[in-house]
Amino acid sequence: MREENRVGGSSDPYLDLLAEKLSGCRETRVQDVPGDVVTMNSQVRLREVDSGREFDYMLVFPADADVRGNRISVLTPMGVALLGARVGSLVEVRTPSKLRRMSVVELIFQPEATGRVDL
C-alpha cells in the first residue's frame, strides 16, 4: 500500500503527476488518436538534450516492463513523462543525480495508428 502524504496525495510525486494527467484525459475513439502522441505500448525514440545520445523505449504496463529490453513501465518517472508526450516535445525526468531532458524525436510505433487496439 502506498504511503499517503499530508495533503492526501501519494508519497511519490510522479504518481501524483500521472493521476493529474489521467484526470485531464477524455475518452477518444481509436481512429481519432493523433499519430504523434505517445500512448501505451508505443515505441518512441528520444534524444537526450545534454549529450545528444538517442534511446528507443517502449511504454508498457508494469507487468511488461524490462529495463534490458528498453520496455519502460508507465509507473516510473520516465513512463509518466512519456505518456501523452508528442513528437517534438521535451520531457524532463528528475533522477537522483540530475534532471534528464529528452526530446521526443520519433514515434516508431503507435498501436492506435495501426489499429492494434488489442495491445
Image (spheres, rainbow, N blue to C red):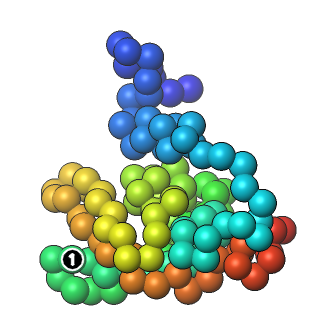
Query: Looking at numbered disc 1 in the image, what kind of residue is underneath it?
Result: Val
Observer able to see residue 108:
yes
Q: Quadrant of residue 53?
A: bottom left
Q: Considering the image in quadrants, where does the C terminus appear?
A: bottom right
Q: Residue at 72% across / 55% down in the picture?
A: 28
Which is more toward the observer, 3 or 46? 46
**Does residue 21 appear left or right of residue 65 in this picture?**
left
Q: Position of residue 80 (x, y in %)?
A: 46, 53
Q: Considering the image in quadrants, where does the N terminus appear?
A: top right
Q: Position of residue 12 (x, y in %)?
A: 39, 36
Q: Where is mark 1, residue-wise?
A: 49
Q: Residue at 15% across / 77% down in the picture?
A: 50
Q: Residue at 72% across / 49% down in the picture?
A: 27
Which is more toward the observer, 86 or 2? 86
Which is more toward the observer, 76 or 43? 43
Q: Residue at 65% across / 46% down in the picture?
A: 26
Q: Please, which residue is most extreme toward the right here?
A: 118
Instruction: Identify the secondary structure beneath mark 1.
Output: loop
